[in-house]
Image: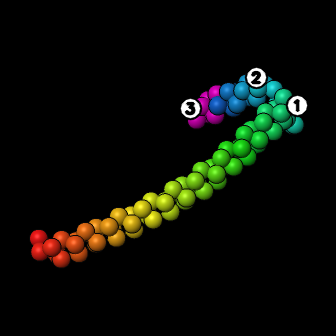
Amino acid sequence: MKKFFSLLIITAFVAVGALITGCSSAPSAEELKQLDDLKATVKNLQMKVAEKKGEKGNLEKQIAEKNGKLQQCQSDQEAVKKGLGK
């Protein structure tokens, strides 16, 4: 009996919720505009992400080049120290 009343209460809540939200089979013009705006925002953000990834790649390349130069300088410095007998 409790299950029956629980099921009845849940069904009533669902029915009332459907009436309150106004069941419609199609989105309104405002909802479609919001969707289009969101799609445009997503597209812009995806373009920015791609741009930032490109910038990150360039910066990583510059860092690798500078690290290579630094290692070469350190190697040269060690060679000079050995040559001077230190």
Instruction: Tell me the SS state at disc 3.
Output: helix
- From the top left corner, tell me how far across and down residue 42 is, in percent: 71, 44
- From the top left corner, tell me how far across and down residue 26 is, in percent: 87, 37
Instruction: Please tell me which residue is depicted at 51% across the width and 56% down the height of the picture.
Output: 59
Give the alpha-carbon distance from disc 2 to disc 1, as whole Å.
20 Å
Q: Nearer the viewer, residue 19 or 46?
A: 46
For residue 20, the mark is 2
Determine which residue is flagged by label 1. Answer: 29
Instruction: Please tell me which residue is depicted at 76% across the width and 42% down the height of the picture.
Output: 39
- From the top left corner, tell me how far across and down residue 12 is, in percent: 70, 27
- Amino acid of disc 3: Lys
Q: Are marks 2 and 1 in contact (CB under 8 Å)?
A: no
Which stretch is magenta? 1-9
Crowding around mark 1 (Cα neighbors within 10 Å: few <14, some 14 to 19, many 20+) is few
- Amino acid of disc 1: Ala
Instruction: Tell me the SS state at disc 1.
Output: helix
The colour scheme is rainbow
Q: Are marks 3 and 2 in contact (CB under 8 Å)?
A: no
Determine which residue is flagged by label 3. Answer: 2
Crowding around mark 3 (Cα neighbors within 10 Å: few <14, some 14 to 19, many 20+) is few
- Amino acid of disc 2: Ile
Mark 1, mark 3: which one is toward the viewer? 1
Mark 2, mark 1: which one is toward the viewer? 1
Work out whether mark 2 precedes mark 1 in sequence or the reverse, and give the earlier one: 2
Work out whether mark 1 precedes mark 3 in sequence or the reverse, and give the earlier one: 3
Work out whether mark 3 precedes mark 2 in sequence or the reverse, and give the earlier one: 3
Q: Is residue 10 above or below residue 73?
A: above
